[in-house]
Amino acid sequence: MAEVLVYVDHVDGAVRKPTLELLTLARRIGEPVAVALGSGAEATAATLAEHGAVKVLTHDAAEYADYLVVPKVDALQAAYEAVSPAAVLVPSSVEGKEIAARLAVRIGSGIITDAVDLEAGDEGPVATQSAFAASFSTKSRVSKGTPVITVKPNSAPVEAAPAAGAVEALAVSFSEKATGTKVTARTPRESTGRPELTEAAIVVSGGRGVNGAENFSLIEALADSLGAAVGASRAAVDAGWYPHTNQVGQTGKSVSPQLYIASGISGAIQHRAGMQTSKTIVAINKDAEAPIFDLVDYGVVGDLFEVVPQLTEEINTRKG
């Protein structure tokens, strides 16, 4: 069976969930070979093996932390040349898509971004994407070279599938461009204790109907009762009620959780483009004609200031 390269997104050896989802998809089309780079790369091996990696290629160097993107592209290209894979899978983050695009250019291959599913085909992997603000689904395959595919978080289940996970050192020679852009400083993001927005299984978002930054505490309380991430519409972000890092939509982040709860959000196309692929959508809005209700699985016509606290209380009661 052909090997499939999987780029590992990790933090000091802690593998992030989207990578484990990629391993599930990789097993559909071949044998996963993981590529782990930077500090803690070897520490990822046990987790990767538990989820199906037959081999883990590792390499650590200061360049991965000190410079942007290009050293990682150099390493992934080295892995590509060493393995000759049937496909290369990369998490569909901002950095992941840049790495994938640069790699595709270097190896002369086609690229598919933001896939939401992957299956084996007679002429290579077939990827499913959402198009036109998730109004349509398309199936496509790369017709030239080795497919380079980025996959959105929450597109596949995380499944245990123990494999050998043999650790091998990857030989990497950095190009001249690898040190072209240096990282001069890093500021850790303040932790809220909530899941990362794009990776969360549940997202609770607030919009214009929240009517003020002080009222986002209602959204946060509901999110915390569910162990969810907090999102916001563009209107709420533009009003300064919530940080842009939490914006869901075409000019914010795209999410695809198992459950999405929209509170006080009318359902403008810009917002829908960022959450329409959610598995189950619930809306709370006092306007029964709000466009969001055209899209939902469950809708509550009511004042969020009455509905959300009651919902939070009921969830906490059932948990307790």
Image (tube, rainbow, N blue to C red):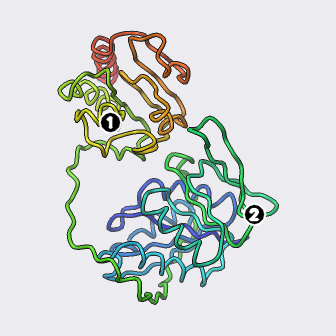
Q: Quadrant of the C terminus?
A: top left
- Residue indicated by mark 1: 230
Please name the residue shown 68% across and 57% down the image: 28
Please name the residue shown 65% across and 68% down the image: 87
Please name the residue shown 42% across and 11% down the image: 287
Please name the residue shown 39% across and 73% down the image: 41
- Disc 2 on helix, strand or loop? loop
- Viewer-side residue, 314 vs 129: 129
Of labels 2 and 1, earlier in sequence is: 2
Residue 71, position as x, y percentages in the image: 41, 79
Residue 165, position as x, y percentages in the image: 53, 71
Whether 267 is drawn above or below 278: the answer is above
Q: Is residue 26 left or right of residue 236?
A: right
- Residue indicated by mark 2: 124
Q: Is residue 263 left or right of residue 255?
A: left
Residue kind at label 2, given as amino acid type: Gly
